[in-house]
Image: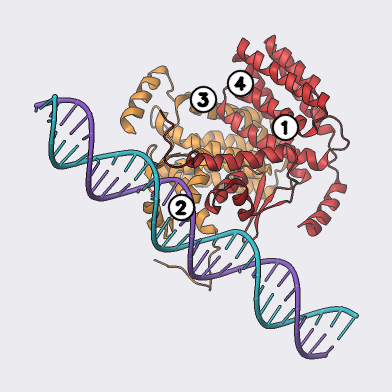
Chain colours: A orange, B red, C cyan, D purple
DNA sequence: ACAGGCGAAACTTTATACAATCTGAGCCCG
DNA sequence: CGGGCTCAGATTGTATAAAGTTTCGCCTGT
């Protein structure tokens, strides 16, 4: 593949790290990487044509985001959130996302509303197409988009972490194959934002998150299953 | 058992990274490192007796926490939060810390209350001693302690970032030399937690944070000052 | 005297080589 | 026949060295 372009268009040296990081996160968001999968440094390095140094920094960043576990002298693995983790993640989302929606309303402009509606269209198309991977990815991106719209960079950073973890949680603990994230909910939220109705938008976001969480199966049974999986799946 | 000394006295390989990271954060929390200070890799490596590889990973983690800025081909610098950053940080704290207090009350045990009261004693002693650095550090640690008590690892991680950034913000934008963090406020919060009075504890935490923020000076004047400082202080 | 450009030094960045550690299989012994 | 041990293979962690880039100082030309 395109080797090291010495000078000409060197596509931002340090962007190679970002490319690796975003590639792996995208794979996780699309449910292509399963929890527990080993992420060998040489393996990833070969895929992206980067040396282990760069792969390592990317993996460390991902570990800091909580979606990769680095075990000493063992390597990096896709994180395997516990039911307790799942509860914490969704509680944090229930706390943060209504606040984000408030800011999004303050920043709502026709351009942003348009952007959101275009996204809704994409989501519907993916769902009609039956493209489960794109559907899952776009569901997460909707929430990220609202956070970007809010202009609150700290909330955005926190939420990016939470979304990535949510993707793993949903993959592990979802009950049935119900559509990833009710598009209707998203549409309702966009509409409320467009009306600048903070009360309704917050409430819709909250119930949306509650519904997602309600579709999960996080009982004590899982705890037993968990232990088994840890011992066996490690 | 786990104490296998592989060689001379190498104190656990990956702990050296943590030591660097915690050393730098402690220096920031104690206001010993000023915003904009350059953190040279060789310099830190010599101080901690580690090679640049380890220093680099530590700095990258700190950059991810938002208290260090890494500029391409320039190096790492202590972050210099803008007034906008400051507002975001404190808004996030006002959102998260009341939620943390709620969990702390659920987890309150005599042992934890004792731990908190011992911390209050330390704070008072440092303040009586006139030890400003210890006082600032302990003020931040109080909030971290409550977060640890809550048992909510995600909130704890978020708050650690916010506290470190707050330390830089207070250093930059505090008006007078009023005591770092009203110890009386902390005492009141501990008391409310001990009474398991969630309503009061949340309210006290909120007003505590609002008071800290009120002591800051984040007006547009700062924006002008900001530009100057960036051009001159870089 | 001042502005602009050239050159060298220092730094970060990246890659490669080495050392330490862990996993897994084969072998010996009970 | 099963269990424990040792050794080989592989993988990660660390350090060192080369490469590229930026910056600062100095010099020259106007």
- Provide the residue designation for mark 3: A87
Residue A122, horizontal then vertical, whole percent? 50, 47
How many marks can you see?
4
Residue C12, horizontal then vertical, whole percent? 60, 59
Residue at x 64%, y 45% (from the top left corner): A113
Considering the numbered disc 1 on the image, is that residue within a helix, a strand or a loop?
helix
Q: Which mark is residue B67?
A: none
Q: Of label 2 and label 3, which has the lower sequence position?
A: 2
Residue C11, quarter of the rendered image:
bottom right
The reply to the same-chain question for discs 1 and 3 is: no
- Badge 3 crowding class, 10 Å Cα cut-off, few under 14, some 14 to 19, many 20 or more, is some
**B202 sits to left or right of A97:** right
**B128 sits to left or right of B81:** right
Q: Which mark is residue B149?
A: 4
Residue at x 61%, y 51% (from the top left corner): B46
- Provide the residue designation for mark 2: A55
Considering the numbered disc 2 on the image, is that residue within a helix, a strand or a loop?
helix
The reply to the same-chain question for discs 4 and 3 is: no
Q: Which chain is mark 4 on?
A: B
The mark lying in front, picked from 1 and 3, is 1
Above-or-below relation of A87 to A73: above
Residue A52, quarter of the rendered image:
bottom left
The reply to the same-chain question for discs 2 and 3 is: yes
Residue B224, horizontal then vertical, whole percent? 85, 52
Q: Measure how far apart labels 2 and 3 are at the Cα level.
A: 31 Å
Quarter of the N terminus of chain B within the rendering = top left
The mark lying in front, picked from 2 and 3, is 2
- Provide the residue designation for mark 1: B137
Are the residues tagged 2 and 3 within 8 Å (C-beta)?
A: no
């Amino acid at each position: 593949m395109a080797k090291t372009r010495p000078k000409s268009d060197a596509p931002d040296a340090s962007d190679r790290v970002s490319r690796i990081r975003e590639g792996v996160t995208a794979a996780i968001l699309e449910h292509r990487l399963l929890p527990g999968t080993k992420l060998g440094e040489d393996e990833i390095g070969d895929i992206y044509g980067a040396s282990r140094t760069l792969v390592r920094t990317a993996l460390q960043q991902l570990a800091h985001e909580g979606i990769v576990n680095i075990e000493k002298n063992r390597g990096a693995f896709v994180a395997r959130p516990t039911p307790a983790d799942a509860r914490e993640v969704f509680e944090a989302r229930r706390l943060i996302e209504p606040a984000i929606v408030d800011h999004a309303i303050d920043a709502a402009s026709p351009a942003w509303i348009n952007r959101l509606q275009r996204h809704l269209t994409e989501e519907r198309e993916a769902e009609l197409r039956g493209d489960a991977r794109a559907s899952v990815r776009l569901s997460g991106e909707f929430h990220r988009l609202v956070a970007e719209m809010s202009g609150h960079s700290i909330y955005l950073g926190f939420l990016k972490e939470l979304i990535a973890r949510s993707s793993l949680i949903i993959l592990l603990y979802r009950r049935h194959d119900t559509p990833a994230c009710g598009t209707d909910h998203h549409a309702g939220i966009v509409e409320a934002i467009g009306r600048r109705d903070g009360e309704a938008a917050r409430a819709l976001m909250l119930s949306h998150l509650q519904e997602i969480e309600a579709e999960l199966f996080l009982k004590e049974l899982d705890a037993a299953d968990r232990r088994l999986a840890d011992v066996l799946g490690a």
